[in-house]
Image: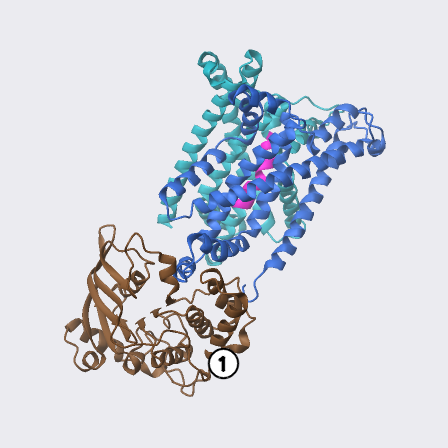
Amino acid sequence: MNYNWNWRIFFDASPEGNGTYLDMLLSGLMWTIATALCSWIIAFFLGSLIGVLRTLPSKPANAIGTAYVELFRNVPLLVQMFLWYFVLPEVVPTRLGDAIKQLPDAPFYTAVVCLGFFTASRVAEQVRAGIQSLPRGQRMAGTAMGFTTYQTYRYVLLPNAYRIILPPMTSEFLNNLKNTSVALTIGLLELTARARSMQEFSFQVFEAFTAATILYVIINLVVVTAATFLEKAVAIPGQR
Amino acid sequence: MLSNFDFSVIVSSLPYLFGQGMVFTVTLTAMAALGGVIIGTLLAMARLSGVPGLTQVAKGYVELCRSLPLVLVIFWFYFLVPYIGAYVTGSSTPIQVGAFPSALITFMAFEAAYFSEIMRAGIQSIPKGQTAAAQALGMNYWQTMGNVVLPQAFRNMLPLLLTQTIVLFQDTSLVYVLSLTDFMGAASKVAQRDGRLVEMYIFAAVVYFVICFSASFLVRRLQRRVAIIR
Amino acid sequence: MTSSPMPAPHATEPAAEAAYAPADAGLQPGHLVSGAPVAAPGETMIAIDNISKWYGDFQVLTNCTTKVAKGEVVVVCGPSGSGKSTLIKCVNALEPFQKGQITVAGTKVADKGTNLPKLRSRVGMVFQHFELFPHLSITDNLTIAQRKVLGRGAEDAKKRGLDLLARVGLGAHATKFPGQLSGGQQQRVAIARALAMNPVVMLFDEPTSALDPEMVGEVLDVMVELAKEGMTMMVVTHEMGFARKVADRVIFMDRGEIVEDAKKEEFFGSPRSERAQTFLSKILQH
């Protein structure tokens, strides 16, 4: 095999003229992290709401929650990305559509919203499973003490459910982070996109992808470590 | 606006969308799922084998795949496979590999990591007594696995394996980044050619939804039946 | 915590009289119901009027009618599946019912206009599996509903909560979490939690049946104390020793019906129905 390794390539100036290839990859990393965090905020709150809807003693609420989850889970993320980016501006009133198209950093905002709504369906499933795994008596005890439904969720069910689902929620957070790379299809210059452009400019395929791989692995390790600390911090004395 | 939604562009491209695109998608999904389950099962067995080295290698591979975005892995294999081919055949230059085999290898290797986690849980769900009983009857490791443990593990995990296959079916749309003509690729090519993005992407979404929703509905029914029998 | 002077007789259910050894729970002096309205015997506190309930086609309660007067202690017993737990959960509308009416302290439970959270805040309930909130400390378990439902200040709520905790003999455990206490201790906390709301009536849904036999006594002691102080109580239990000691009336249920509703002496002396006789002979022969 005759592949010419050149690990010094990272310190060469990139043809974009504002820094080295390493700077290029790190700027991609920043976009990846920013997109992941912003979309997670949407996913967490919207997903919790949808998950709660599916556990309420109300048929219409259950139906809305189920419809949401089924809709966002059964369409590929790439297709959803295109719907938000290419289709949405065309089907809303023309002036609004034009305003969306002229947004600076439109790929970023689109990716945040798209991933937020997509991941919300997964968060919803975790929240629902967490609430349903609690003993039935907990809801009854809250109700029996005079808590309203809102109070029962706020003070009894959710604090327990979130603790139980912390490990799967960590996975969903990481999935969401990895899914940011799908946004390269709508032009977001995140880490994978930057590795790809570095490969196109420099022809050093494997150095570029190795660097991206290492960066992804590091983020994963950081998140998993942080989650372990979080789990310890919120652990309840006397349980498990 | 939706008032000038043009159905004719969808109708006229149906043979292309399904005849080429969907056939590619379904073939890729089926073969990748089959290969992924086989490799995944071997990975799970390696990880549970307790053999020093083997366990760690299997674990490392699975963890690595699970921490990388599929898009990056697709790029990795797209450039790596020609070199692997050259290494295997002893050629001095990278070998040209067709788009389909390249995509197939990618998805088999990547999804194997996810299938292996399911199979690991499946194998671990079989009571230790089953292995003991098989060994007491004089079976060796492969006989025990093949005749006793794996058949039960597959059976218990079938709903999860199928659900993961539905995810795989959706994931194959990402071969778009290699400009391959899967269902989404075909829809996208028509969309660009005719300037009909709204129609084609909405249609693609509807098709994916109908297929995945029906499939997951069937999986849920299967799950209930499996749950009753167990 | 509980060193019963008598050896726990056996581990079979239901624990019979012998398992109930008084005065081993370290009850502190003082009244458990301080602050509760003074009982004026005779006034109706709970009126259950011709209740029927179905799960789909299956009828779980059939025309149940009874009353609990202020200050009265009523024990509800019967074989499992007889509907006794369902009946007691209808009293504070944890279970809906399709026919009839229940009136608690003058408020109709099944009326559309009834403010159920408000009604429930005045009805204390103790569950079979304690249902303390596992993520909250004992103090927070005792105070959260006082603060969030009754709107009491944090200091007042804490004072009342710790006061009651001391009276069920667990003053030293205020900062612990439910998972760090034994079953018997958790159930005593659960009773204190219900009392902290100044309930006008207390409902007990098999409060000792999830406990190890050696812990039954400490919980029953608290309940006896409560009964003696004049609390209105409706208690679903198999503990016939408890019934003998403090009950005013015993209700026997079978297959969703109230088969017998009699003064304690009559019930234990000469149950009229054959079903009650069979039940009693089974439960007392241990």
Q: What stretch is highlighted in magenta?
A: B105-118
User: Residue A147: image x %, image y %?
Assistant: 43, 58
The brown chain is C
Q: How is the rendered protein coloured?
A: by chain
In front here: A1 or A94?
A: A94
User: Residue B209: image x %, image y %?
Assistant: 46, 29
**In the rendered image, which quarter is residue B42 located in?**
top right
Query: Do we see residue C205 in this rendering?
Result: no
Q: What residue type is labelled 1?
A: Met
Query: Height in image: A97 above or below C151?
Result: above
User: Residue C54: image x %, image y %?
Assistant: 24, 54
Q: Total marks drawn?
A: 1
Q: In this view, does A176 lie to the left or right of A195?
A: left
**In the rendered image, which quarter is residue B93 located in?**
top right
Label 1, on which residue?
C1
Q: Is residue C104 left or right of residue C273?
A: right
The blue chain is A
Label 1's element?
loop
Query: Height in image: A51 above or below C59?
Result: above
User: Residue C53: image x %, image y %?
Assistant: 24, 56
Tell me if mark 1 has few (under 14), some (14-19) or many (20+) residues whose alpha carbon lies within 10 angstroms of its own: few
Residue under the image location 18 percent in, 80 percent down: C266
Could you tell me what secondary structure mostly forms the magenta stretch?
helix
Residue under the image location 49 percent in, 44 percent down: A49
Q: In this view, does A98 lie to the left or right of C104?
A: right
In front here: B156 or A9?
A: A9
Chain letter of the residue carrying label 1: C
The cyan chain is B
In front here: C107 or A237?
A: C107
Q: Is residue C282 left or right of residue A23?
A: left
